[in-house]
Image (cartoon, rainbow, N blue to C red):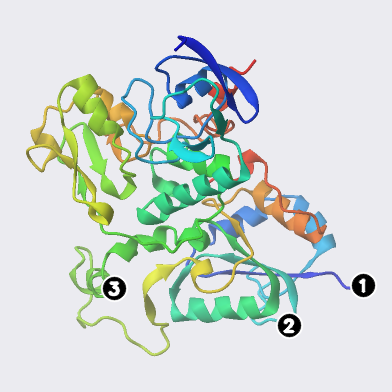
């Protein structure tokens, strides 16, 4: 029987949650006995090759590409997990949510004290994904099955969730594994 | 009426004295009723409703409701836990609670209740409101992004410090914690040692120059859920 597949991605995140996944240390050898990675920065597979059991999503949705990738994950994964505070509540990128988007862009490209931008233009190439008006947590865009908060969630938290799901057991978390920081 | 009597919480008979609230009597008996706006030494306020229990089948806030002989109180039930979860989730989505960089994280009562109740993510849409920060005072700042309107600073400043530094302004969703008489914290007599500063359950009123003083793993709620101290008193 082929191993179940796990896909991972980082949307509007910092890859810290992926670092935390790698922080399971030598247990990654056990993990690789249990699963194959599909689309993921860990093996650098860019597109889904088939159906996945679990999708781990780091980061919230800050732009239209994030939304497309997230929808693609929902389409291909049986169980979709929001990993980290950005995915569950927007996280640091959501600090811009109280400031109008135009003001954010003007500060970044025109008015900021350290800006050097002789063109005086805000980048608007069609290759650059359009920013959303706000940063959205993943569950406000697609259905999310489990949330693992934390910045990042500890390696033990991710390990516990993954092994429970792969073993078809309930994802019960001890008190010390659910933290918001 | 007798001065000493008993009543029932979740099937257990507990002692109480005349004039005690349900919450106080439960605390002394080692039964934890979750609460946010209540704090020992401050007048009960009944604002947050997290301590809501069923008294003879009717919802009442345990921090303001006097204990009565023979009443039947329900506290640790699935229905009430679900209601408390929803209240905490609403507080999370109504403000801007960025635990990852908050100095209060690990010692925050709102966060601790989220942990204790097992909230992984709020089910309600985040509002990301615009809130003001007052950093004019040399020793203390007020970040209204994190304020949950519990009124503990209002009561502590009025009743314990005798200064009336804080008050509420506005109604409903526009309700805010304000600084009396003037709009700037720097123009008040507030000192960092005031009870009002220590009374804040969240990271809304914080001392400057402290930062992340206690390392992760050694903070109040890192290993033990909020209420453990009360529950350890149980016989």
Taking depth in this image into account, of B22 and B185 the one nearest to the observer is B22
Taking depth in this image into account, of A99 and A106 the one nearest to the observer is A99
Determine if residue B80 is in view: yes
Crowding around mark 1 (Cα neighbors within 10 Å: few <14, some 14 to 19, many 20+) is few
Label 3: which secondary element: helix
* Chain for disc number 3: A
Which residue does the image show at 40% across and 37% down from the upper left?
Answer: B104
Q: Which residue is mark 3?
A: A101
Crowding around mark 3 (Cα neighbors within 10 Å: few <14, some 14 to 19, many 20+) is some
Residue A174 location in percent, x, y? 67, 41
Q: Going from the N terminus, do you reach mark 1 or mark 3 first?
A: 1
Residue B23 location in percent, x, y? 47, 26
Residue A77 location in percent, x, y? 69, 74
Q: Which quadrant of the structure image shows residue A162?
A: bottom right
> Does residue B98 appear to the left or right of B209 in the view shown?
right
Farthest bottom residue in view: A126
* Chain for disc number 2: A
Which numbered dot is residue A1? 1
Label 2: which secondary element: loop
Determine if residue A180 is in view: no
């Amino acid at each position: 029987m082929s191993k179940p597949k796990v896909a991972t991605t980082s949307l509007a995140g910092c890859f810290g949650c992926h670092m935390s996944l790698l922080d399971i240390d030598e247990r990654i050898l056990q993990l690789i006995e249990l699963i194959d990675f599909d689309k993921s920065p860990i093996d650098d597979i860019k597109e889904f090759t088939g159906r996945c059991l679990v999708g781990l999503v780091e980061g919230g949705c800050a732009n239209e590409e994030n939304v497309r990738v997230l929808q693609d994950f929902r389409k291909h994964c049986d169980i979709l997990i929001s990993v980290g505070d950005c995915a569950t509540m927007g996280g640091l990128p959501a600090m811009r949510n109280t400031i109008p988007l135009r003001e954010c862009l003007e500060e970044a490209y025109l008015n900021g004290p350290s800006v050097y931008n002789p063109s005086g233009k805000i980048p608007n190439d069609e290759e650059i994904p359009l920013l959303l008006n706000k940063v959205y947590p993943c569950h406000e865009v697609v259905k999310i099955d489990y949330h693992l908060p934390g910045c990042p969630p500890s390696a033990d938290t991710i390990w516990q969730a993954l092994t429970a799901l792969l073993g078809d057991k309930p994802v019960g978390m001890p008190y010390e594994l659910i933290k918001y920081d | 009426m007798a001065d000493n009597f008993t009543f029932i919480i979740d099937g257990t008979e507990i002692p109480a004295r005349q004039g005690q609230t349900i919450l106080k009597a439960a605390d002394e008996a080692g039964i934890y009723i979750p609460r946010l706006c209540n704090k020992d030494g401050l007048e009960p306020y009944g604002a947050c409703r997290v301590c809501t229990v069923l008294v003879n089948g009717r919802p009442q806030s345990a921090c303001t409701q006097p204990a009565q002989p023979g009443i039947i109180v329900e506290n640790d039930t699935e229905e009430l836990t679900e209601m408390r979860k929803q209240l905490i989730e609403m507080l999370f989505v109504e403000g801007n609670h960025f635990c990852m960089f908050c100095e209060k994280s690990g010692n925050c009562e709102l966060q601790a209740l989220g942990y204790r109740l097992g909230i992984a993510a709020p089910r309600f849409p985040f509002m990301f409101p615009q809130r003001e920060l007052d950093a004019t005072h040399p020793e203390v700042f007020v970040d209204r992004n994190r304020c949950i309107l519990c009124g503990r600073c209002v009561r502590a400043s009025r009743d314990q410090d005798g200064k009336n530094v804080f008050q509420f302004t506005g109604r409903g969703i526009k309700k805010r914690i304000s600084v009396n008489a003037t709009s700037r914290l720097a123009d008040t007599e507030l000192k960092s040692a005031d009870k009002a500063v220590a009374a804040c359950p969240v990271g809304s009123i914080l001392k400057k120059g402290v930062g992340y003083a206690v390392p992760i793993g050694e903070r109040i709620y890192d290993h033990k859920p909020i209420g453990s101290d009360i529950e350890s008193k149980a016989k």
